Amino acid sequence: MIKRSILRYLVISWIVVSGCRAAGTAMMMAGETSGSAELAAAGKSIQQATREFTEEEKYYVGRTVAANLLARSQPVRYPLLVNYVNAIGSTIVSVSPIPETFRGWRFVVLDANDQRNAFSTPGGFVFMTSGLLKTLQSEDELAAVFAHEIAHVGLDHPMGAISASHQRDAIAKMARLGLKTAGQESREVKALTGVFDAVVGDVMKAVANGYSQDKEGDADRLAVDLLQQSGYSPRALVDVLKRIEGDTTTHGSPAERAAAVEKVIQEANATVGIEPIRTKRFVGVTQRAFGAP
Amino acid sequence: MWKRWIMVMGFSASFPEIASADVMRVQIERARLLTRPSAFSPAKAFLKYGTEIEPRGKTGAYYRVSTAKGEGYLHVAVVTRQRLVMVQKTADAAASSEEVAMATKGFNAQVEASYREDHPDLRFDLVDDVEAKVDILDPVKRFARFRRVGKLGEYLPIPLPPEPASSSPDASSDEPTSSVEETGESADTGGIE
């Protein structure tokens, strides 16, 4: 009994000293080494309770947010346009902090002529409304919109919108689920579904309503970098912002953002011009998809 | 028995990183094993979710790794130190108990299926459709011609041409150059089928 008390004291002290996550991992190792299922399970529980969301979990949150957006507008299915926007998006994500997501990036044009907006979800679904696309005048401008949305995902802004309490709740429930056997799981899954609902709600709100001015600024700065690295003109982002200047957007004041982006471009000495061939194919693809303006 | 626990934990507390060792796991469904540590490098193979790797070095945002499929590079974002539960793929709510037991213990297809029961209005069918429409097994390879025609990515002319913003730069003579005509593309949709 004394030995058990000493052990418990040592374990708790050690967890505090060495950090919870490492402690959980080491307890799992100790449990596996000594053949103690109890210790291994406790270690796993601590490790789970202190972990972050995995790419797979972000993907399932993103899928659900995407399902929400697609309940409002249908995707444009014209194959040439589908390939075109995915080619542009793929070029930019290759130089982004997350070039590969759990099941790959997808770029979608939403059939919504009366809206000028763009969205991105965790896991790599990026949407642009046809209303916004028809406003744009070059491939580089289209790339600029995608670069901004990719930057939000690269900076983890959508998952960062989850409230602290929902995040704690989710991680704790996942940890509990990790200790259940198959037969015990259904009730825990139901509980996890409840918190999944709350998490999706938080992310959906941020994706649809936009982020803080600071986060929009951060996304613009990263977008400038992504555009330059991938070979598109960063100045196209300024052009897009000027083009939507009169809009009430979910992304902050376009005029203020354009001025800030201009400054970033000057400071970074970003110098990539627009290749005419890109603008030519932009016109060709969009005219085939939507008809001549 | 308890002495052994204390020894293991004491040792790992002294060297916190040793607790997680430097074993990493692929955390996406299919990671591209690159031939070079660069954004537009060709993939020499694909590594499945959960594949364990031990990085042997790091160049920028890429780990150098040695795998059963050969040596190569993986982007830091595709691996994790977290332990992952191998996933038995099932998007089906009526998964067998064995499949359920093997599912990831977090937000997964099982949780999505449960969520969908309460939200029949959401268009998961369109999400599936979007995923099916675009083959993204190897987008870097698939869209290489698109980048070449548009002078993007690895085909970006270097040194960079000077601004002005609205003018088009001249192509550098020693860089890969191509025109729509040269590649036999349709004149108005260069590099896209």
Image (cartoon, rainbow, N blue to C red):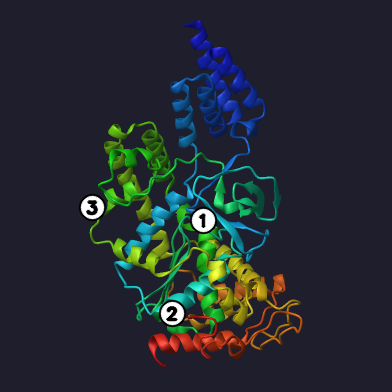
Q: Position of residue A58 (x, y in %)?
A: 44, 52
Disc 2 element = helix
Q: Earlier in the sequence, mark 2 or mark 1?
A: 2
Q: Mark 2 lies on which chain?
A: A
Distance CA(mark 3)–CA(mark 1): 28 Å
Whether residue A122 appears in this view of the structure is: yes
Q: Quadrant of residue B25?
A: top right
Say yes or no: labels 3 and 2 on the same chain.
no
Please give the label number shown on residue A87: none
Residue sticking out furthest to the top = A2
Residue sticking out furthest to the front = B69
- From this view, report whether residue B29 is shown above or below residue A279: above
Q: Residues within 10 Å of mark 1 (few under 14, many from 20)?
A: some
Name the residue: 50% across, 60% down: A153
Q: How crowded is mark 3: few (under 14 residues within 10 Å), some or many (20 or more)?
A: few
- From this view, report whether residue A161 is shown above or below residue A262: above
| Residue designated by label 2 | A81
| Residue designated by label 3 | B118
Residue sticking out furthest to the bottom = A292
Q: In which quarter of the image is residue A93?
A: bottom right
Please give the label number shown on residue A156: 1
Disc 3 element = helix
- From this view, report whether residue A185 is shown above or below residue A108: above
Q: How many marks?
A: 3
Q: Where is residue A164 in the image (x, y as percent from the top left)?
A: 44, 45
Nearest the eye: B11 or B163: B11
